[in-house]
Image (cartoon, helix red, strand yellow):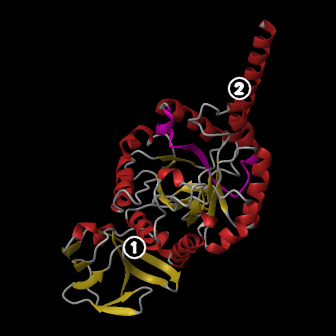
Amino acid sequence: MQMIKSGKALVTLLIILIFLLACSLGNNRTAQKGKIFISSDKFVTIENEPFFPIGIYSANPPSGFKEIKEAGFNTVHTYETRRNYLREYIDNAARSGLKVLIYPGGDLANAKFSMEEMVNTIMEFEKAPAILAWYLSDEPELQGANPEQIAKLIKSVRKMDPSRPGAMVVAQIDKYGDYSDATDIFMVDPYPVPRKPLIDVAKAVDLARKTVGDKKPVWAVLQAFGYQNEKNKGWGWQREPTYLEMRAMTYLAIVQGAKGIFYYTYHGSQYFIKESPRHWENLKAVVKELRAIYPLLISPEINSIERSIMLEGSSQSSLFWTVRNVSGGSAPIQEGTYLIVVNGANEPVMANIRIKQHSGTDIHVVFENRKLVFSDRQFSDLFAPYEVHIYQFK
């Protein structure tokens, strides 16, 4: 028995020595450092270009990457931790032009987490350009994880790979503050359909930004799952969101300042999106639209104009908006100033939109082939349930 204990101690010591050596090497690697960093606008930046991840969770079949890429996604996620699997996963993603989120040896909050696997995974894959960020923990508060212990482990990951950020998703809004300091990228996953109002997405992103003090990116993981059949019950969510609901949730997250959007999920233990063909097409339609407006997604907010907007009309509390300025761009989003307004309610809203700090005359509504008259610094428009309007000022 004593020999067994000694053997375990030796293995543990070797792991620690490997870890310390890896940290030392990591701190001296200048070639990798700075390739992926977080800009002052809180965008993840790759080779000095802002990157807005449009991702999907649990995209496990490597054979499906071609379809996922063609659908418009630029990032995939997997819960798999086996390094043999990850080698093929990362290589196939790279060949398809996709970035990946992967665990560095397992969920840091899980009892099955292995420091040895974390060291080996980071040492093997740290130079893989397809890895956008290390996925550190999935809803640690629901696993009863200690925030301080999580923070210590995340510091270890940072020391080993200082050139790449870490991301963590927290589900419960009352726990945001417990974990907000631990990670480089703070992710939230509100799933409101059908039990809660969609504006919970806006509230979650807004609260997350306030909790982190706008000092790091907030990414939103949005609901694209629900009950399919008795085999795939969707973890208790009674139905999948509709096209209008998914589109509204997406824009609610964007206008509240999310710097990345992910959808849950492609294939999980109780859900497989391909078994809902129409729903899969709906999600792809939303993602296609995001790719079309990509210049807007990587453009900074214009807070001075945003704060000058006043809305008058019924149920105006359901309307959320942001103002963005695009430099360059390409059709349909060309250079100019844009106002995105989302109706988060399942009822129509007629709104009068007054903008004190804008003196233009014409307003073009993107995707809708119509123009509005901007007179006396205001205009009016109707919002159907869950409708989104994108206005370009001329």
Q: Mark 2 belongs to which amino acid?
A: Ile
Residue numbers of the magenta segment: 125-145
Closer to the camera, 177 or 45? 177
Q: Quadrant of the C terminus?
A: bottom left
Residue 313 image-quadrant placement: bottom left
Q: Is residue 139 left or right of residue 272?
A: left
Q: Which residue is pictured at 41% across the width and 82% down the height?
A: 336
Q: CA distance from mark 1 to mark 2?
A: 48 Å
| Residue that carries the numbered disc 2 in the rendered image | 16
The residue under label 1 is: 324
Badge 1 or badge 2: first in the primary sequence: 2
Residue 128, magenta (yes or no): yes
Kind of element beneath mark 2: helix
Q: Is residue 345 left or right of residue 312?
A: right
The number of callouts visible is 2
Residue located 74% across and 56% down the image: 90
Report whether 236 appears left or right of 174.
right
